[in-house]
Amino acid sequence: MCQTCGCAVTPEKGQPSVVIEVLQDLLSANNQAAAHNREHFDEHGVLTINLMSSPGAGKTALLEATILALRDRYRIAVIEGDLETDNDAARIRAHGVPAIQITTGTACHLDAHLVHRAMHELPLARLDLLFIENVGNLVCPASFDLGQHRNVTLLSVTEGDDKPAKYPVIFRASDLVVLSKADLLDVLEDFDPERAAAALRALGRDTPMIRTAARRAPAIESWLSWLEREFLAWRPVLRVPRPLMTAPVRA
């Protein structure tokens, strides 16, 4: 719960309109900042992806594997969001990639204003891909546009396969669902990928779901293919054409 997204605002008896007005004001201001962020990303030709999940689903591990696979082809940077510590940003920087840590304190999500401040610390003109690793939370991040071009939600096989049904807002807002830690499926009896896929389809969107593993038995080929397809599909909207093959950016 936090004060910045309205999730801690509870209606007093007979005053539900007050809560609605507070939330509308919060989202309106955020959406204006998000549109401004997107203008920056578009102007500099940076495809920006918002990674969301519950805590511990493997976002940082997936980013590390992605950087190792793509850093000689794409110029990558990361904005990290956590309540405390810069542990994840340090992990990313260890791979020679710029990473800006946003420490939110009590806020349970990133917002467009926080991302705006962070992106001005990055060399946007020398980037191709920017990943925003949101705070681990399956509720509030879904409501806040950051200026990103794509939303990706990780669903770890160590979680319940009914998560799309329980948290429909974040999964409905996703352009891709990544079934992470899939190498553990052979030792987990409670998680059924088909049930997870059925819960996702029940939301009324044809959102693709792919399987990845980033540690014990790495398998991220489907994720890398999706990234390249999205980048190629997005490139025609760039104001200034840019080459696909580029030199990596080092921190």
Image (cartoon, rainbow, N blue to C red):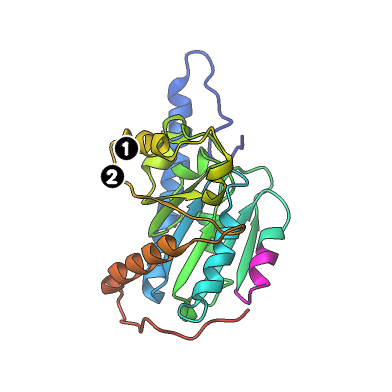
Earlier residue among tags 1 and 2 = 1
- For label 2, count other residues whose C-alpha is less than 10 Å away and answer few (under 14), some (14-19) or many (20+): few
Q: Residue furthest top?
A: 13
Kind of residue at badge 2: Asp
Q: Could you say where residue 228 lies in the image, as x and y percent from the top left?
A: 37, 69
Q: Residue shown at 71%/59% (left/top)?
A: 87
- The reply to whether callout 1 and callout 2 are in contact (CB within 8 Å) is yes
Give the SS element for disc 1: helix
Res 119 seen here: no
Label ID, residue 206: 2
59 shown above or below 129: above
Residue 73 image point, x, y percent: 46, 80
Task: Tell me if residue 183 is in the magenta stretch.
Answer: no
Q: Quadrant of the N terminus?
A: top right
Q: The C terminus appears in which quarter of the rendering?
A: bottom right
**Magenta residues?**
89-97
Left/right placement of residue 154 relative to residue 245 reads: right
Q: Residue at x 39, y 51 (%)?
A: 176
Give the mark count. 2
Percent of width and height locating residue 207: 33, 47
Front in this rendered view, residue 212 or 154: 212
Question: What label sits on residue 201 in the rendered view?
Answer: 1
Q: Position of residue 69 (x, y in %)?
A: 51, 73
